[in-house]
Image (spheres, rainbow, N blue to C red):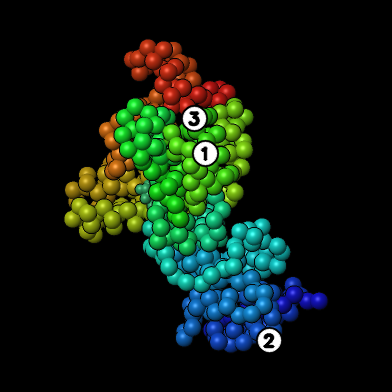
Amino acid sequence: MRRRVLLVDDEANVRKALSTTLGKVGYDIKEAASGDEALMQVESFRPEVVLLDLRMPVMDGMETLRRMKQLDGTPPRVVMMTAYGSASDVMEAMRLGAFDYIQKPFDLAAVKQVVADALVHSEYEELLPGQESGDEGQERSGLIGLSPAMQNVYKLVGRVSMSKANVLIQGESGTGKELIARAIHANSPRASQPLIPVNCGAIPENLLESELFGYERGAFTGAVGRKQGMFELADGGTLFLDEVGELSPALQVKLLRVLQDRKLIRLGGVEPISIDVRVIAATNRNLQERIRQELFREDLYYRLNVVPIHMPPLRERKEDIPLLIRHFLAKYSREAGKEGLYLSQATMELLLGYHWPGNVRQLENTIERAVILASGPSILPEHVRGHLQEAGAADQPAPVSGIRYEGRTMREILQEVEREAIARALRKERGNKLQTAKRLGISRRALLYKIEMYGLEMSEEEQA
Ligand SMILES: Nc1ncnc2c1ncn2[C@@H]1O[C@H](COP(=O)(O)OP(=O)(O)OP(=O)(O)O)[C@@H](O)[C@H]1O
Ligand SMILES: [Mg+2]
């Protein structure tokens, strides 16, 4: 039997082009020129795949998709088409249960591919229990970037946000892991409940345990009352475990147990407390590598990594750089009262050619500083160069620039600076601890202690 495909677009020539291409593949094809027509066709023709235009007069693609999902019977796989791709469109479409997303003007080979993909089983389908409609939790994500790599990320965000599955976001520093975690929460049915972030790398281990799981009065010296932990505060919502790769072995075991049992016992307590928490974890470390070094538990890794999201480094999606620049330039020139600042062509070329070891965060900092430095109407190479060289020389972002200050204690901030400084020095000395200690002007003993505390042991390859 031939596979049935429905093409929905208000423009006849688009329908024609698609129908010719897909007709050659051998699909049984029908066309619809509006959302209403499409809904009737879905009921009578029962297509397996629908290519649906997002921008149509009267009933747009989103609304059509929403109604399609409410019809009886197995809903078709829907591929959204639009000329105005934006992160929030992609996420919204995916959240409403679209299978995929293509941008106009499309490459017809890509259209064939996406239809073929839609006809085979989607591995993420089981993560989508009864797709609901509804627009609670919609929030501007603030995500910039339309490269294919980012589109893939948006698609995953859309698909996982309706489920409760734990998500592990991996990627280099400054690639937007936290932003993505927030987008997943904001697009989920839990959006009205809290998102509680915990930076596992910044809180000393003994504090982290009570922060996460809470304590009963008298659990330890100074525990004068009972306190709820982050897990309890996140009940019904999302717990964001940032820098999860830094968790100590002891805490890894405790976390695993809570994730398995969906229950926790406060420090010094006896009563198990049931919790309903979705966990999103993030790390800029290679967890597989840490598992091999026996620094991270494999069983915990699988618990956290139900849905993996990999954030692409900026150097692998250079087409996003101009969009990000425009966004940050607008933001920071507004803040500085210097609206209308212009980026000279030479500056643009310089920024496009750079390899951005500190990713989006470094780009953002570079633009922020350039806006401050610029005295005339445009941003010149000299306004950005200092920042790039400084970072480029050590092949790392400047240590202090990427640090978040809000909501952190002095101690946490200083620890992060210290951790960065040690990590950089270690890299420069290729793991030679004696040299690193000398460079930093501390004793070797102190260095070893801090390496252990911050989990900075280098792998063999990194030392080579
Ligand atoms: N796609 C994006 N669009 C707009 N801003 C972005 C994007 N990605 C990152 N940013 C900005 O870059 C900065 C760093 O992002 P974020 O904190 O999410 O990165 P991260 O991956 O968590 O970094 P780290 O591993 O260092 O914690 C933030 O100011 C964020 O707003
Ligand atoms: Mg982060």
Q: CA distance from mark 1 to mark 3?
A: 10 Å
> With respect to residue 260, does 102 lie above or below?
below
Q: Earlier in the sequence, mark 1 or mark 2?
A: 2
Are the two marked residues, 1 and 3, in contact with CB atoms closer than 8 angstroms?
no
Q: Earlier in the sequence, mark 2 or mark 3?
A: 2
Label 1 crowd bin: few (<14), some (14–19), many (20+), radius 10 Å: some
Instruction: Name the front one of labels 1 and 3.
Output: 1
The amino acid at mark 3 is Ser
Q: What SS does tag 1 mark?
A: helix
The amino acid at mark 2 is Ser
- According to the picture, the residue beneath numbered tag 2 turns out to be 44
Q: CA distance from mark 1 to mark 2?
A: 51 Å
- According to the picture, the residue beneath numbered tag 1 turns out to be 255
- According to the picture, the residue beneath numbered tag 3 turns out to be 248
| Among the 4 quarters of the image, the one containing residue 145 | bottom left
Q: Quadrant of the C terminus?
A: top right
> With respect to residue 384, does 38 lie above or below?
below
Taking depth in this image into account, of 205 and 359 the one nearest to the observer is 205
